[in-house]
Image (cartoon, rainbow, N blue to C red):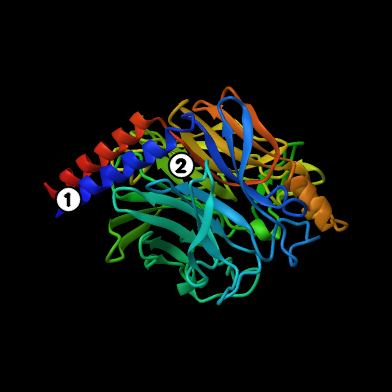
Amino acid sequence: MNVIRNSVSIVALLALAGSAAAQAPGTIVFTDLAGAASAGQAIRSWAPSNTVSTHVLFPVSANDAGFNDPQLVDLRLSDIRAGANGMWYFGNGPAQIANPSSNASIGQVYDLFGTPSVGTLTSNVPAINPLGMWYDHSRGSLLYINNTNQNARNGTQFPATDGGLNAVNPGTGATTRLWNQLPNATPTPFPNLGTFLTPSGQGNNDYYSAFPNGGTYLTSQSVPVSGGGTQLMPANRNWSSVIARTSIPSISTGAATQTVLADFNGSNTYTDLSGQTQTLPLLTDVRGIIARPGSNELYVTNMARNAIVSGNLADGAQGIWKILLDATGNSIVGVSQIFASTAFDPEVIRFDSFTNTLVFSELGYEADLARLSPFATYASTAAGHNNGRLSRINLDGTGYTVLAQGVRVRGIDIIPTPGAMAVLGLGMVVAGRRRRA
């Protein structure tokens, strides 16, 4: 039985490689909210020829018309992932989160680069606000974090069972809960309101997830300001961020174990490779997370959204951080900032196996200023968001390149080489054989 399952997984991977072969390896597919108040949101791609194409356009609805802030009522695109046999999946989590929700869903697109056919994989509960997604090719499931934004610290509490990590069977639409969002009364640190997730780079059944507000309460915490000096953290950024590891030995039975890997509160420590004690940085808005396949490296984005004082960034850690794990993937042995942002907030991040680089989204700086201004309007806030970028850097933080300007990217996937997909499939089979040994 196990051999048959693994054989099917390879076929699915090769089918994806074959369907992607029509597009140049390194083509970046992304969701874009930039036209939310005018032409509409879209699924687009950037090709290595440096051209941007629109493949699916979602026209502005009557409810969203004129509602310029990209916290939209009927449609708010999130992450996007390639599945098997030419199918693509995308999240839709309107900001007016509710249970039940008539608008939230996970959509699917077949023949994205030809004549796209758009449908729905699952909707309403439990897909109330699907954010980060990952297609687990070895087990034929779409994993996604359902972020209910139910943080009672700042708003209405939703039942903990509404949020968490889910797995959807693409063939049947059946959903399996892998872990539940914990109640807000849970002592910190804990995995609170996840954003994005990534499989381990070690080819096992582990995943890592980012949680912007799951860490230590920092009500009196001062942080460096780029213009000099320090400032107290704003009220809605008074918790440090957490990353957690989830081991998923079985998706069908919902068997999963979640543990906090790090609480970036600026005082916790770790032991580096030389045996020296080091202090974890203060990170207050970790969103994006990605592992480099075949390595013990994680890369995370830390935003400074809502943490701007008098035009200065009040979070000196804004940018992209490299996290080095030990051989087990259970402990941090190195942390370094490889890219410091100034005018833009990095959010979604992905590894491009074709160029061995990192591709990430950036929100416009104007959006942050508008949110803090007492005279902010939806239009000015949207103007900042929609002046975002799709960018690329090398793994050491050099070679910063803007691929697309004037976009509001919330999801990224990258078409690898067919050879890379085949290697990934064989790696999954090897990992499976090791687990059975």
For residue 219, which quarter of the picture?
bottom right
Neighbours of disc 1 within 10 Å: few (<14), some (14-19), many (20+): few
Q: Residue furthest left?
A: 437
Q: Where is residue 110 in the image (x, y as percent from the top left)?
A: 47, 50
Using the image as rendered, state which of residue 221 and residue 196 is in the foreground.
196
Res. 290 mark: 2
Camera-side mark, 1 or 2: 1
Could you tell which of marks 1 and 2 lies nearer the N-terminus?
A: 1
Q: Residue at x 65, y 29 (%)?
A: 402
Check the picture and name the quadrant holding the N terminus.
bottom left
Q: From this viewpoint, is residue 193 visible?
A: no
Which of 390/261 is in front? 390
Query: In the displayed structure, does residue 210 sit left or right of residue 157?
Result: left
What amino acid is found at the position of numbered circle 1 in the picture? Ile
Instruction: Name the spot of residue 244 as percent of width and height, x first.
Output: 42, 53
Q: Do the residues labelled 1 and 2 touch (CB within 8 Å)?
A: no
Nearer-the-camera pick, 380 or 271: 380
Pick whichever, 164 or 213, lies toward us: 164
Circle 1 residue: 4
User: Residue 73, position in %: x, y?
Assistant: 69, 66
The answer to which image quadrant residue 164 occupies is bottom left
Residue 319, quarter of picture: top right
Count of numbered badges drawn on the protein: 2
Most extreme residue toward the top is 399
Q: Is mark 1 on a helix, strand or loop?
A: helix
Residue pictured at 57% horizontal, 43% vertical: 30
| Residue 417 visible from this viewpoint | yes
Residue 194, relative to residue 96: is it above or below? above
Rounded to the nearest angstrom, the CA distance separating label 1 from label 2 is 30 Å
Amino acid, disc 2: Ile
User: Which secondary structure, mark 2?
Assistant: strand
Residue 256 percent location from the top left of the image: 31, 61
